[in-house]
Image (cartoon, grey):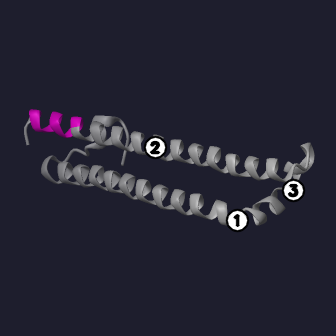
Amino acid sequence: MGFFDAIGDVANRAKLTGEIALLDRDITVRKKQFGVELYDIVDKHEKQKKKGANSMLEIPGIFKTIEHEIKEPVDKLSKEIRVLELEKRGVENEIELQGARQYRDVGTPASVGLGKNV
């Protein structure tokens, strides 16, 4: 493995690390979107009940009455997050595999190129 191969490996590891960061961001964004969706459901229910300002203190009761509305978004979010986490784990495994191959071929851990151990 030559100098240019090592540079290519470091560049590929940097790309994969970037993919992990993007997947982390996607997970966070989706969770935030879910929070907005959930708030909209609760708010709609509260307006229908016309209970007044203190009604948000009764959160467990609110969720019981709108459980059927919440179930679908929760299930959808859970599936989306699971897919993103599996994609992230796949990229992390690819990085680890590259490091092992570089160590096998050259004897230098690939993590040296990025300044961290995988």
Q: Is residue 7 above or below residue 95?
A: above
Q: Are marks 2 and 3 in contact (CB under 8 Å)?
A: no
- The secondary structure type at the circle numbered 1 is helix
Of badges 1 and 3, nearer the viewer stands: 1
| Structural distance between the alpha carbons of marks 2 and 3 | 32 Å
| Structural distance between the alpha carbons of marks 1 and 3 | 14 Å
Magenta span: 3-11
Residue 112's image quarter? top left
Q: Are marks 1 and 3 in contact (CB under 8 Å)?
A: no
Q: Is residue 13 above or below residue 71?
A: above
Residue 20's image quarter? top left
Q: Is residue 14 above or below residue 94?
A: above
| Structural distance between the alpha carbons of marks 2 and 1 | 26 Å
Mark 1 is on which residue type?
Glu
Q: Residue at label 1? A: 67
Seen in the image, is 109 located left or right of residue 8? right
Q: Nearer the viewer, residue 100 or 64?
A: 64
Mark 2 surroundings within 10 Å by alpha-carbon count, few (fewer than 14), some (14 through 19), many (20 or more): some
Mark 3 surroundings within 10 Å by alpha-carbon count, few (fewer than 14), some (14 through 19), many (20 or more): few
Q: Position of residue 81 (x, y in %)?
A: 48, 55
Q: Position of residue 84 (x, y in %)?
A: 42, 53
Callout count: 3
- Tell me if residue 5 is in the magenta stretch: yes
Residue depicted at x 27% and y 53%: 94
Residue depicted at x 34% and y 42%: 19
Q: Residue at label 3? A: 58
